[in-house]
Amino acid sequence: MSALPPLNSIRAFEASARHLNFRLAAAELGVTQGAVAQHVRGLEARLGQALFERLPRGLRLTEAGRRFHSPLRRAFRLIEEAVDDLSGHRQITISVTPSFASKWLVPRLNDFIRKNPEIAVQVDARERLADFRTDGVDIAVRQSRGPIGDGFNAKLLFSNEFIPVCNPSLGDQISVPNDLMRFTLLTDSHGLWPLFLERVEVAGRARTMSFSQTSLAIDAAVSGQGVALANAALVASELASGELVQPLKETLFDDLVFFVVAPLKPRQPELVSLMRDWLLSQA
């Protein structure tokens, strides 16, 4: 049997493959970005295979890299679980989008930790869908317009009621839907403003400012840059604090809804059930 590559090289590759970024992998491992890149280059030389495509902004796994990463991730998870079992430490990893994390989950998460102090929570906030088999994720919150698919347990968290929101200084100037055309409409990747304007019978070409994440559009609305069309649940805190107001009573219901998703046979059924029940109770 041939000697295994150095463990540091394997750890550097595995972290880089999860983040698709040497800088983020270095931050996780507590080393320099150059050290991570050097470890990966050494591993590629040893294996005689390119594991990554180096892109201007980040990395992309090659086919060989994908084949290599999947069993490595499972192996590291087994090691982590063995350590947790021996130490009595329990951890659950939840995958959510960055906007859901910042606007809904994080403000409430202390309640879960207060009720379950023995459980560590790891929040994996990325736009791409988590792979339960390779990413070490136990449970996820995702938006979908249709069935989640076979092999998963999906529970409705809340429906998508979209409402117009803005800074109170702008809200005083909006009393009917046509008033919206005097302000910048802040859009996100869902792009639902045209549907809302059609529903309230407002015609014309509006000024827009687009953001890749819902949370950025909400933050822009808080700072008075325009009017956002946001999921009511994601702006509940800002409405309660008075940072945002809902200037119009009209709403838009869309079939893009939030689900709590977990495998039918999770690795940690007790923790998954506990987290799922808590999420549903918060909604």
Image: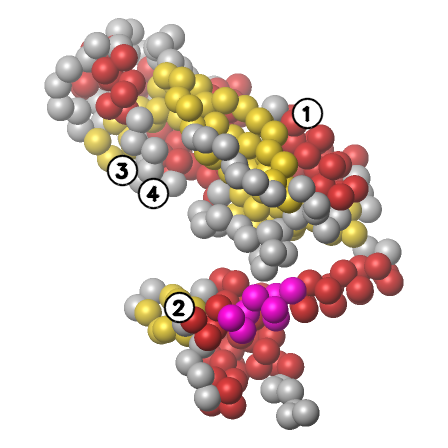
Q: Secondary structure at mark 3?
A: strand
- As shown in the figure, which amino acid type bears the numbered disc 4? Ser
Residue 210's disc is 3
How much space separates mark 3 and mark 4, taking CA atoms? 7 Å
Q: Which residue is mark 4?
A: 212
Determine the residue positioned at 48% across, 48% down.
129
What type of secondary structure mainly makes up the magenta span?
A: helix
Mark with earlier residue (2, 3): 2
Mark toward the viewer: 4 or 2: 2
Q: Secondary structure at mark 1?
A: helix
Q: Which residue is mark 1?
A: 281
**Crowdedness of circle 4 by 10 Å Cα count: few (<14), some, many (20+)?**
few
- Left or right relative to 78: residue 10: left
How much space separates mark 3 and mark 1, taking CA atoms? 33 Å
The N terminus sits in image quarter:
bottom right
The answer to whether marks 1 and 2 mark residues whose Cβ atoms lie closer than 8 Å is no
Q: Is residue 71 magenta?
A: yes
Query: Residue 229 placed where, x, y %?
Result: 35, 24
Q: Is residue 42 visible?
A: no
Q: Is residue 194 visible?
A: yes
Q: Which residue is mark 2?
A: 59
Mark with earlier residue (1, 2): 2
